[in-house]
Structure formats: structure tokens, C-alpha cells
Amino acid sequence: MRTPALLAFAACAVGAIALQSSDYPTIVTQKTLYAKTDLRGKKAPELVAETWLNGKAPDTKGKILFVDFWATWCGPCRHLIPEVNEWSKKYGNDIVFVGLSDEPATTVTEFMKTTPMNYHVATDPKKRMANVLGVQGIPHVMIVSPDGIVRWQGFPGSQEDPLTDKVLDQIVAASKSKS
């Protein structure tokens, strides 16, 4: 008597797995986040910056938003910049890349004279977005889909859940399928 119900459940489970493969990346629950607030799967805070250093604030409407919380003095942050430059070149039609530092604009501007950052760079000394997330370690990246939901958050070089082209590909593909 329970066999038809079990088969129906199994069919639903298989369907859910098939749907998940074309959806956003699965959230890795066992992961060191280096932030007090885990917003993965939740509404993202508003992008706030005091000064945009290489142009005006980007238009993020209908785009994925990649925010890298970083600082000029941070070795892992400096190490990530060339990779973000490459991602910006590869995914620039679909993702708006933003480097957000809480340092003074003059400090970041001087740094940018010797280190190319081919994406949007801004400063927010008041740490408004960083405080919402409770960022405790940098670099810290937050990726937001066009519907305003955080799809990936954390330390990009994490062994538990590294930020890779595959993750970005999944987020882009899922965002396109939803538009």
C-alpha cells in the first residue's frame, strides 16, 4: 500500500535534484564565514559607498553584483585582485564587480597607481555594508543575484567552499534562466 506513495516521493526527490543542478549553487552549510551575519539565501543589503574612485556608481539593475570587501594592507586581498580583474573581463556582461574598502580614498587611489583594478572601486570609511554583514576577515566576497538575494558569501580562497569560475558560471546560468 505504501509503495505508490514511496514511488511518488522518489520521483519528486529526483525531480528536485534535477532542478537543483540548473539552479544557483548549493549553499555549503559547514563553512567558516568570517562574518557575523550569514545572508546566503537572504535579501542583500543596499550597495553603499562614500566615494567611487574610478567613475560613478555602477548600474546594477538586472545584473549580478559581486562585492569584494578588501584593504590595501591585506595580502590575501592584494592576491585576489588579478583574479577579480580576470573575472571582470570574462563575466563583465553579466556581473558588476565592486571592490569596497573602508580606507581613505587617498590611500586606495595611491594603491591603484601601481596595482591595476579593472573594475569598480569604492570606499566606505563608515563600513555601512561591512557592518550589516559583520565582516570579521577580509577579503570577504558577497555575490547577489539580480533578484537581490545573496547567492555566495565568504572568503574566496576557502578550502571548504572556494569561489571559482564554476561557481560564477552557475550563478550566471541560474540568473539567466530566471530572467
Image (spheres, rainbow, N blue to C red):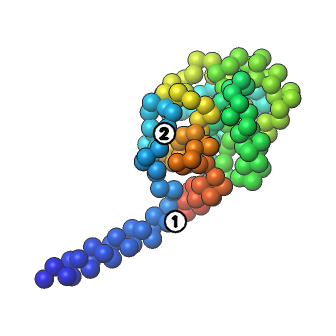
The kind of residue tagged 1 is: Ser
* Residue for badge 1: 22
Contact (Cβ within 8 Å) of mark 1 with mark 2: no
- In the displayed structure, 101 sits above or below 179; it is above
* Image quarter in which the C terminus is found: bottom right
Residue 119 x/y as whole percent: 75, 39
Numbered badge on residue 32: 2
Residue nearest the observer in this picture, 144 or 133 = 133
Counting from the top left corner in percent of width and height, residue 11 is at 33, 77
Determine whether 147 is above or below 77 in the image.
Answer: below
Q: Is residue 116 left or right of residue 88?
A: right
Determine the CA span between mark 1 and mark 2. 26 Å
Bin the neighbour count of mark 1 within 10 Å (Cα to Cα): few under 14, some 14-19, many 20 and up: few
In this orientation, does residue 112 appear? yes
> Which one is closest to the eye, mark 1 or mark 2?
2
Q: Position of residue 115 (x, y in %)?
A: 83, 32
Q: SS of the residue at dot 2?
A: loop
Q: Residue furthest right?
A: 114
Q: Is residue 179 visible?
A: no
The mark total stands at 2
Give left or right: position of 115 versus 97.
right
Residue 24 x %, y %: 51, 57
Secondary structure found at label 1: loop
**Which residue corresponds to the image point at 76% horizontal and 18% vertical from the top-left?**
107
- Pointer 1 or 2: first along the chain: 1
Q: Residue at x 44, y 33 (%)?
A: 37
Nearest the camera: 46 or 19? 19
Characterize the local packing of mark 2: few (<14), some (14-19) or many (20 or more) Cα atoms within 10 angstroms: few
